[in-house]
């Protein structure tokens, strides 16, 4: 009987929680992992809290809050640095091992009464950081194990492990206190955490280790954009952060009252531990019941705005009651309201309020809101309590008056949050297409949040519906099911495809029958989405279904089935084998070779390329490489995109080679951007080491700029150094655009000043070389006849150097455009170069007024020198130019990152036919990285390669 029961249980779990059979093992392991981590927290927290309160009393809590907040903020800074330096698995491993050692150490020290008095702040703060850190690391690991689509399906089930741990841990603590001393519970906690070490290592080894840095970065996106700045720039996000912060602040004050009353009414340490453990778990149970049975009804009946009022209203009633009945049961009642409603009704309402916020912004600000806002609010609560409890010596019951006043502020913030949501919602609907249209449109009224979403889905314009479907895809709310279902009949293929993508995650009905008919749609995007839906929800044998349609005589259906299958089976070797994906791609390739119609051939090969890229089928990477040379533009673009989807480093160089071609440039930029943050370092190295074509190197800057991050800024700053002029100019321009468009990105003023001074020095150096060459040319004419070829070569070099002067001036003024507003600076160079004399003088006068003293000293003489003849004595005296020897001239020029200039120098050396330059050429051969320059130098030295 055991086996059938296990099979039934497995089938039930797979169906009920939307988990695929091949995902079950890793999902259960992750669920067990978070269950143990939260269980441990619910064992340690009541234990440490009871020890802390028994010895230091509740009067020590305010300082504990402040220290916890400080440690959380400081710790998060160093933790972020550690994540940049070490891989996630190493950090998780070290954190868990350090936690085990800490728990054992605390247990031993407390057992022998070594830790007492103020030293108890150490374990008190430690337990708060432990809860924050381990949970954060766990979800980072989970995000690495699953892709976005998988995460949406299974994270609810994994999160149930956390809830179960919260329930089990507290009740376990209550039970164990009847059998063990309070201090001994820390050893139990250490034993529990030790189970997580091999669990985490196993998950990393079998699910993550095979991924390269690009695949890891896509799954675990880190972004250096300042979340604080992003929150500050959005009124809606700012109000959400304030409302969350206010709820945390009030919760901490309630927590203080709760701990104070408990320590006064409960005498012994063990009873206090049992009390905390019991109520921690009971709060989890109540929260779970409300979440399962009441949250959607409350939010659905009262709307999101009014649902946000439940938590503050409940606390307000409890706080007023406590003023008149100062009993433990009243504060327990308030704690139950706070603990249960916060994680259910309040959380669900806040998530719906964030619908208008773009998903990438939400991701970047979530951790900041969860950690930093929480920590700041905790710290403020500590300071309030220190002032009123320790300073003014008021009773903990009187804290209710402060709570009531703060709730009034909280309610006002909720009102403004609701108003800002309406504004943000309308902005979401006011898409670019509507803005451009001068035709009067009926405005969609924004009332309740659910009602507003449904109204858009039912009566909105196409672009409004598309925008809203992107948002509902993030929240996965069953209340939108029927409105989205109705969109399956919409005239727009984009709407239908996105509607199917939404329905993929909703469970109200299985729409396999209706969506199966949609695989015959004329649009391949719709048919691909339909196949993905069927792969998950089809009631019969999905393998038979796909076999039938992949072998269809209808090319669109066959191609869509293949692409849909490849998308759904990405990173899943087990399912790929089960569906024989490799053989299906092979069959499609054979079909492609047999087809005669050009359009059919192109559509088939594009589907094959997409499938190879989606599913990362390495055995067919040679097909991708072949089609990256295709003469058909559409096929070529598909090949570029598909190559990037593999996230394989071997395709980076072939994709780069398409940057310099206008027709494929944007696709190549987007493809390289898909490789995510680590590609910045790869691109930088390729430019610096000159392993890519000069023409492509300049457009690499567009890829780096697209990241709009501090890392991108830092890399661009490096590329303004010893690089080719075109690369340097593009890097400067990119820096200028990023600096003025995204003020939160930092470019040090000192860097800009130093760069301008370097360019001024280079300008003077170039002038000195030109002057030296003219002097040399004059001397050679007077002493001996210079050959015609040599004279032409020298004139060519001088002409090229004069062009380089213009380039250097251009760079100087573009750097100025980073430091000063571009609209002020950009016209100045043109005026100095081409304006009338009076305009030139005014332009230099303007420069003199805006520049600091250091820049004036170097830049004004350079600007003034432009007005003079290139080799006039006045210019030479003004700039105090050095006169170089011929070898010094060539050495100076050959050190520069300027291929054309180097060739001009080598050509002149060749025509001079002078053996004195041999040591210089040998030096070039040692230091030069450019293959063409090396080859030319070897030829001049008479070396055969």
Image: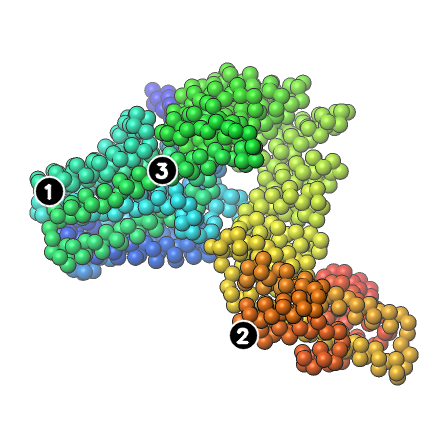
| 366 w.r.t. 634: above or below | below
Earlier in the chain: of badge 1 and badge 2, it is: 1
> What percent of the width, then of the height, locates residue 432?
54, 36
Numbered disc in front, either 3 or 1: 3
Residue sitting at x 88%, y 80%: 781
- Residue 514 is situated, as x and y percent measured from the top left of the image, at 51, 16
Image quadrant containing the N terminus: top left
The answer to whether residue 433 is above or below residue 404 is: above
Q: Which mark is residue 853?
A: 2
Q: Are marks 1 and 2 in contact (CB under 8 Å)?
A: no
Mark 3 crowdedness (10 Å alpha carbons): few <14, some 14-19, many ≥20: some
The residue identified by callout 3 is 419
* Vertical side of 839 occupied by 495: above or below: above
Residue 883 appears in the picture as rendered: yes
Cα–Cα gap, marks 2 and 3: 50 Å
272, 758: nearer the viewer: 758
Quadrant containing the C terminus is bottom right
* Residue extending furthest toward the bottom: 783
Provide the residue designation for mark 1: 323
Residue 942: give x, y in percent of width and height.
83, 68
């Amino acid at each position: 009987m055991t086996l059938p029961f296990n099979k039934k249980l497995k089938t039930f779990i797979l169906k009920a929680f939307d988990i695929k059979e091949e995902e079950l093992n890793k999902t259960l392991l992750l669920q067990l992992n978070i269950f143990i981590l939260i269980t441990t927290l619910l064992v340690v927290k009541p234990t440490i809290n009871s020890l802390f309160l028994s010895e230091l009393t509740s009067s020590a809590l305010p300082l504990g809050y402040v220290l916890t907040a400080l440690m959380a903020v400081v710790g998060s800074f160093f933790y972020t640095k550690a994540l940049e330096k070490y891989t996630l698995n190493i950090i998780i491993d070290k954190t868990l091992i350090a936690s085990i050692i800490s728990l054992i150490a605390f247990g031993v020290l407390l057992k022998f009464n070594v830790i007492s008095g103020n030293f108890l702040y150490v374990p008190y703060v430690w337990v708060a950081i432990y809860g924050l850190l381990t949970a954060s690391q766990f979800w980072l690991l989970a995000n690495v194990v699953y892709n976005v689509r998988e995460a949406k399906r299974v994270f609810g089930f994994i999160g149930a492990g956390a809830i179960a741990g919260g329930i089990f841990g507290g009740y376990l603590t209550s039970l164990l206190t009847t059998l063990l001393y309070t201090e001994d519970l820390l050893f139990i906690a250490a034993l529990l955490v030790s189970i997580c070490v091999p669990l985490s290592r196993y998950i990393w080894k079998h699910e993550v280790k095979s991924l390269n840095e690009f695949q890891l970065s896509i799954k675990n996106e880190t972004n250096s954009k300042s979340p604080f700045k992003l929150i500050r720039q959005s009124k809606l996000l700012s109000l959400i952060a304030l409302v969350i912060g206010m709820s945390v602040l009030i919760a901490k004050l309630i927590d203080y009252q709760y701990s104070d009353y408990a320590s006064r009414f409960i005498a012994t340490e063990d009873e206090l531990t049992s009390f905390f453990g019991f109520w921690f778990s009971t709060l989890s149970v109540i929260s779970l019941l409300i979440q399962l049975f009441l949250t959607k009804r409350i939010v659905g009946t009262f709307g999101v705005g009014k649902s946000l009022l439940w938590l503050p209203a409940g606390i307000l009633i409890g706080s007023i009651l406590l003023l008149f009945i100062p009993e433990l049961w009243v504060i327990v009642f308030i704690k139950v309201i706070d603990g249960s409603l916060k994680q259910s009704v309040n959380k669900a309402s806040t998530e719906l309020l964030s619908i208008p916020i773009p998903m990438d912004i939400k991701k970047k600000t979530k951790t900041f809101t969860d950690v930093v806002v929480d920590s700041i609010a905790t710290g403020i609560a500590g300071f309030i309590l220190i002032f009123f409890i320790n300073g003014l010596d008021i009773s903990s019951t009187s804290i209710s008056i402060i709570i009531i006043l703060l709730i009034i502020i909280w309610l006002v913030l909720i009102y403004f949050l609701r108003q800002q949501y309406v504004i943000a919602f309308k902005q979401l609907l006011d898409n670019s297409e509507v803005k451009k249209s001068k035709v009067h449109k009926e405005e969609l009224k924004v009332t309740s949040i659910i009602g507003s979403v449904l109204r858009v889905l039912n009566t909105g314009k196409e672009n409004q519906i598309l925008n809203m479907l992107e948002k509902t895809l993030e929240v996965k709310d069953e209340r939108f099911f029927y409105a989205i279902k109705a969109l399956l009949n919409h005239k727009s293929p984009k709407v239908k495809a996105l509607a199917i993508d939404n329905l993929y995650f909703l469970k109200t009905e299985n729409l396999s029958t209706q969506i199966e008919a949609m695989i015959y749609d004329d649009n391949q995007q719709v048919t691909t989405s339909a196949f993905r839906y069927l792969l998950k929800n089809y009631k019969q044998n999905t393998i038979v279904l796909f076999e039938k349609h992949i072998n269809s005589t209808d090319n669109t259906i066959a191609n869509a089935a293949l692409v849909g299958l490849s998308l759904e089976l990405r990173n899943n070797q087990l399912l790929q084998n089960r569906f024989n994906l490799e053989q299906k791609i092979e069959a499609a390739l054979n079909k492609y070779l047999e087809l005669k119609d050009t359009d059919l051939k192109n559509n088939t090969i594009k589907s094959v390329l997409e499938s190879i890229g989606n599913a990362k089928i390495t055995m067919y990477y040679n097909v991708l490489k072949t089609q990256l040379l295709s003469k058909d533009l559409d096929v070529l673009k598909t090949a570029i995109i598909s190559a990037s989807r593999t996230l394989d480093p071997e395709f980076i160089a072939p994709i780069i080679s398409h940057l310099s071609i206008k027709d494929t440039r944007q696709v190549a930029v987007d493809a390289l951007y898909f490789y995510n943050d680590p590609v910045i370092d790869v691109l930088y190295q390729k430019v610096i080491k000159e392993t890519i074509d000069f023409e492509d190197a300049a457009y690499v800057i567009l890829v780096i700029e697209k990241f709009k991050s501090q890392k991108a800024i830092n890399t661009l700053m490096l590329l303004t150094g010893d690089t080719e002029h075109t690369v340097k100019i593009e890097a400067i321009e990119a820096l200028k655009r990023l600096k003025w468009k995204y003020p939160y990105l930092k470019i040090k003023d000192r860097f800009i000043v130093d760069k301008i001074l370097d360019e001024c020095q280079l300008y003077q150096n170039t002038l000195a070389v030109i002057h030296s060459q003219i002097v040399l040319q004059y001397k050679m004419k007077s002493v001996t006849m210079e050959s015609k070829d040599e004279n032409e070569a020298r004139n060519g070099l001088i002409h090229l150097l004069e062009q380089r002067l213009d380039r250097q001036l251009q760079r100087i003024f573009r750097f100025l455009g980073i430091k000063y507003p571009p609209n002020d600076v950009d016209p100045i160079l043109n005026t100095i170069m081409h304006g009338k004399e009076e305009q030139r003088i005014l332009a230099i006068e303007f420069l003199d007024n805006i520049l600091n003293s250091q820049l004036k000293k170097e830049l004004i003489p350079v600007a003034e020198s432009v007005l003079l003849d290139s080799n006039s004595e006045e210019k030479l005296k003004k700039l105090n130019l050095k006169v170089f020897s011929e070898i010094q001239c060539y050495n100076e020029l050959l050190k520069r990152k300027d291929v054309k200039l180097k060739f001009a120098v080598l050509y002149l050396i060749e025509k001079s036919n002078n053996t004195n330059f041999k040591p210089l050429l040998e030096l070039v051969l040692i230091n030069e990285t450019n293959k063409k320059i090396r080859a030319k130098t070897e030829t001049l030295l008479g070396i055969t390669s």
